[in-house]
Image (tube, rainbow, N blue to C red):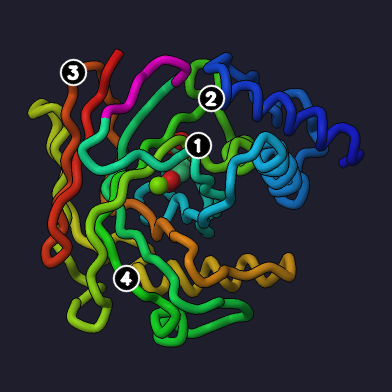
Amino acid sequence: MDPYLVEALAAQVDRAALSGETLTMLSAEHGELDLHSAYSIQRASIARRLGRGEKLCGMKMGLTSLAKMQQMGVHDPIYGHLTDAMILEPGGALSLSGLVHPRVEPEIAFTLKADLKGTPSPDEAMAAVGSVHCAIEVIDSRYTDFKFTLLDVIADNTSACRYIMGEGYAPDDLELGNLAMKMDVGGREQRSGTSAAILEHPALSLARLVAMLSRCDEGLKAGQTILAGAATAAVHIAAGDRVEVEVAGLGSVSFSVES
Ligand code: 0L1
Ligand code: MG
């Protein structure tokens, strides 16, 4: 794809995330959009955020559950970028103003104590993890009528919007591959699953992210946060909801939703 078009589409994606304006599917108007150009648009949109002073603080994995991959007709997860503007403190309030289709997912997050690059095994990837956290991801696809393809989602930074992390725990004491996970949304919707739904094991998700980044000669840095993926389907949120996620061995974390 022409680099000028990548920049123009990144500006559209960025504006939608900033203002809550909806986006027309990029793939419908640009037949040349492919995996490479979709990630280029994502990176160019993140560069715009960093240019405004946001700090890159980590990465996220998306479409990590078999159910979600089947729903989207894909075999691979996808990744997005996290900035400090996406952090919501535990117990904090999220305003729906400027959001388009906000939903929540129960997740596991890692904080890294060492850099990661190349193609580590899950055990090698876990050796770089300083702490494990229960987490909530708020995703917000900016596409009109919630219609998009995989390439559109990648260009839109995998719908990343906000994330909330609970207290950190040492990874060694946990059976990370099979932790019970529960999410309550306003007392009206409950979801439950296990961490095994996150690409079979959150450590595998982390290792896979590093391998995907290595194809672009990139890696992860000590201090970064990684959202490993969701254990259940996403749930829509509405003003007045209190959202809580509890993970066995990792405690719980919550936030509230305001209009
Ligand atoms: O975090 C994720 O799994 C990304 C989901 C992207 C698609 C969507 O908005 O449902
Ligand atoms: Mg997610």
Circles 1 and 2: CB atoms closer than 8 Å: yes
Disc 2 is placed on an element classified as: loop
Indicate if the residue with disc 2 has its beta carbon within 8 Å of ligand 1: no
Neighbor class of circle 4 (other Cα within 10 Å; few <14, some 14-19, many 20+) is some
Q: Tell me the mark number nearer the camera, choosing from 3 and 1.
A: 3
The amino acid beneath tag 1 is Ser
Q: Nearest the camera: 92 or 72?
A: 92
Using the image as rendered, state which of residue 122 and residue 97 is in the foreground: 97
Is 203 placed above or below 20 here?
below
* Labels 4, 2: front one: 4
- Around disc 1, counting alpha carbons within 10 Å, would you say few (fewer than 14), some (14 to 19), or many (20 or more)? many
Q: Residue at x 41, y 56 (%)?
A: 227
Mark positioned earlier in the residue sequence (3 or 1): 1
Residue at left 35%, top 21%? 95
Percent x, y for residue 236?
29, 27
The tag on residue 240 is 3
Q: Name the amino acid type tagged 2.
A: Arg
Residue denoted by label 1: 159
Secondary structure at numbered mark 1: helix
Residue 121 versus residue 237 in the image, above or below: below
- Range of residues picked out in magenta: 93-99
- The mark found on residue 131 in the picture is 4
For residue 143: magenta?
Answer: no
Quadrant assignment for the C terminus: top left
Task: Give residue 200's mark.
Answer: none
Residue designated by label 2: 142
Tell me which label, 4 or 1, sits earlier in the chain.
4
Q: Position of residue 181 (x, y in %)?
A: 17, 55
